[in-house]
Amino acid sequence: MAQRIANKFPLDTQARKALGVALPFSGGGDAVFNSNYSTKDQIKSNLINFFLTNQGERLFQPNYGANLRAEIFSIVNSQNYEYLKSKIENDIKNNFPNVSVSDIEVLGSEDYNSIQVIITYNVIPFGIQDQLNLAFN
C-alpha cells in the first residue's frame, strides 16, 4: 500500500542549522537575536517583516514592504475592510509565491483607531498551515 510522505524542506532535517532571525526580536541571555530553525517559523517571520515594513524603509529595495500602516490608519472604517483584504492577498501572491492565503479576517475598532488582521495561510510545497496575527493600534 502506497503512503504519502509529507514534503520536508531539507534544512529542517538539520537541527542545529539556523534558517534566519526570529521576529519579534527577543534575544535572551547572551544572544542578541533568536534564530529560527524551521521553515514554518522562518516563513512566518518573513511575512511579519514584510507587513510591518513600509515601502522606502529598506535600503536598496525601495519597493519592499506592504505600506500596511499607512493604509490602515487612513481607512479605519468597516466599508474599506474588503479593500484591505484584497491588498493583503495580492501582496502575498506577488511577493511570496509559495504561500497561499486560506482566510483573511479584519477586526477593527473605529472608536479606538485600531485594527487587527488575522491571516491564515498555507505553504504549498511543504503542507505547512499557520496563522499570522497583526495588531495595529
Image: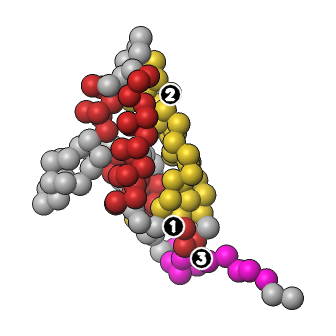
Specify the amino acid type for callout 2: Leu
Residue 20 x, y percent position in the rendering: 40, 64
Please tell me whether mark 1 sits on a helix, a strand or a loop.
helix
Q: Residue at x 45, y 18 (%)?
A: 109
Judge left or right: residue 96 versus residue 1.
left
Label 2 – label 1 distance at C-alpha? 28 Å
N-terminal-most mark, 3 or 2: 3
Nearest to the eye among marks 3 and 2: give it: 2
Please tell me whether mark 3 sits on a helix, a strand or a loop.
loop
Is residue 65 positioned above or below 128 on the image?
Answer: above
The residues colored magenta run 3-16
**Numbered badge on residue 8:** 3
Whether residue 114 is visible to the viewer of this picture, yes or no, is: no
Q: Which residue is mark 2?
A: 107
Q: Which residue is mark 1?
A: 39
Judge left or right: residue 80 versus residue 107.
left
Whether residue 96 is visible to the viewer of this picture, yes or no, is: yes
Specify the amino acid type for callout 3: Lys
Specify the amino acid type for callout 1: Thr
Residue 121 is covered by the magenta coloring: no
